[in-house]
Amino acid sequence: MSSVKIELRQDQVDKIHSICDSFGNQEGELINVLHKSQGTFGYLPAEVQEVISEKMEIPAAKVYGVVTFYSFFTMIPKGKYPISICTGTACYVRGAETVLNEFKKQLKIEVGETDVNGLFSLSCLRCVGACGLAPVVQVGDKTYGRVAPDDVGEIIGEYMQ
C-alpha cells in the first residue's frame, strides 16, 4: 500500500499541539503523545509525526523510530472494523493460518491492508491470552474463539449490515 500525502487542517494541527501540551511537551512522554494522537486520528501518518516532532522539539527520525518500533502504532489507516488473527503458538497449531488465509481470500486484502470500502483491515497478533479458545480472532473489541475457516463469512457478515 503506497503512502498518500495528506494535508492537515489547522484544527487538526491545533489538536496535535493540544495533545503535546497536555503531556508538557516532554520527550519522555512521546509514547503517550503518539498513543493519544493515534486515538484521535486513527493512525499516525508522516504529517502527524512531523507536527509532533516540531512541537516537542524531537528529531522526526526519533518519532518515526518509535512509531515503527511498536506494533501498536500504525501509519496506515485502519478499517472501521479491524480484524486481528492470533498467530501465537496455541492458535497457530490449531489452524490460525487457514483462518487467516480465508479472511485474506474473502476480503481480497493482505495482512496490513484495508479493504477498498474502508470497512475491514487485517492484522496478526501474538497471543490474546485466550489459548483455550484457539484459534482466536478479534474484530475491534469482540473476540471469537475456536474459529474455523467456515466461520469467516459469518463473522464478516455481522459487520456488513
Image (spheres, rainbow, N blue to C red):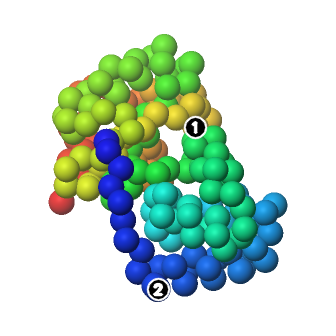
Which quarter of the figure is the C terminus placed in?
Answer: bottom left
Can you tell which mark lies on residue 115? none
Q: Earlier in the sequence, mark 1 or mark 2?
A: 2
Q: Is residue 103 visible?
A: no
Front label number (1 vs 2): 2
Q: Which residue is mark 2?
A: 11
Which quarter of the figure is the N terminus placed in?
Answer: top left
> How far across and down, in percent of the image, does residue 135 sit?
45, 27
Residue in the picture at 21% in, 39% down: 107
> The residue under label 2 is which amino acid type?
Asp
Task: Judge by depth and name the residue closer to the eye, 47 or 84.
Answer: 47
Residue in the picture at 57% in, 76% down: 16
Q: Is residue 124 visible?
A: yes
> How far across and down, in percent of the image, does residue 69 sit?
63, 41
Question: From the viewer's perspective, is residue 127 above or below residue 20?
Answer: above
Question: From the viewer's perspective, is residue 98 above or below residue 3?
Answer: above
Task: State how many labels appear.
Answer: 2
> How far across and down, in percent of the image, does residue 31 sit?
70, 58
- Quarter of the image for residue 149 reads top left
Residue in the picture at 63% in, 82% down: 18
Q: Which residue is mark 1?
A: 128
